[in-house]
Image (cartoon, rainbow, N blue to C red):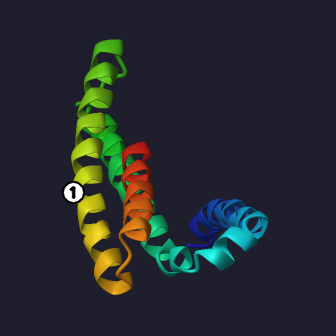
Amino acid sequence: ALEEAYTRGRWLLGLLVLQSSSSFVLDNFQDLLKENIVVTLFLTMLVGAGGNAGNQSAIKVIRGLATKKMDGSYENMANVLTQQLAVGLLLGVSLAGVGYLRVYITNGDATNAFAISLSLFFIVVCR
């Protein structure tokens, strides 16, 4: 148990340090965030959606490698990337639509809802 905790702990510590760098980004945009405080209310939604979408893609690839459904060939890689792009686009559009409604209903501003849902779309597609 100690060996596994050490191995996983190293990765988690590295990710924690890497993710903490977002505070520097947010600090550089303090004035913009003060003017558009609504963005901060939905940061957890954006970050969570990106993390969840990325984890699902990673698990799909890991499962494919473990079951030998993915063999590492160029053709297989192209098929997987094409399929994942299509899935990402479908999920991005649907989640952005739901995100737009959520922001609009709770905030009442179409511009904020559009900006946040557009961000959500790109986050999901890129993951």
Query: Residue 12, percent across and down?
Result: 62, 65
Query: Residue 9, percent across and down?
Result: 64, 68
Please tell me which residue lies in front, 118 or 85.
118
Q: How many marks?
A: 1
**Mark 1 Cα-neighbour bin, 10 Å: few <14, some 14–19, many ≥20:** few
Q: Residue furthest bottom?
A: 106
Q: Decide: is 40 above or below 64.
A: below
Q: Decide: is 126 above or below 81.
A: below
Snapshot quadrant of residue 96: bottom left
Query: Residue 67, percent across and down?
Result: 24, 38
Horizontal relation, residue 78 to residue 38: left or right: left
The residue located at (39%, 47%) in the rendering is 58
The residue located at (78%, 64%) in the rendering is 28
Secondary structure under badge 1? helix
Horizontal relation, residue 103 to residue 38: left or right: left
> What residue type is disc 1 on?
Ser
The residue located at (36%, 53%) in the rendering is 121
Please tell me which residue lies in front, 108 or 117.
108
Which residue does the numbered mark 1 point to in the structure image? 94
Query: Residue 102, percent across and down?
Result: 29, 77
Q: Quadrant of the N terminus?
A: bottom right
The residue located at (43%, 44%) in the rendering is 126
Q: Decide: is 78 above or below 100.
A: above
Horizontal relation, residue 7 to residue 64: left or right: right
Snapshot quadrant of residue 62: top left
Q: Residue furthest top?
A: 74
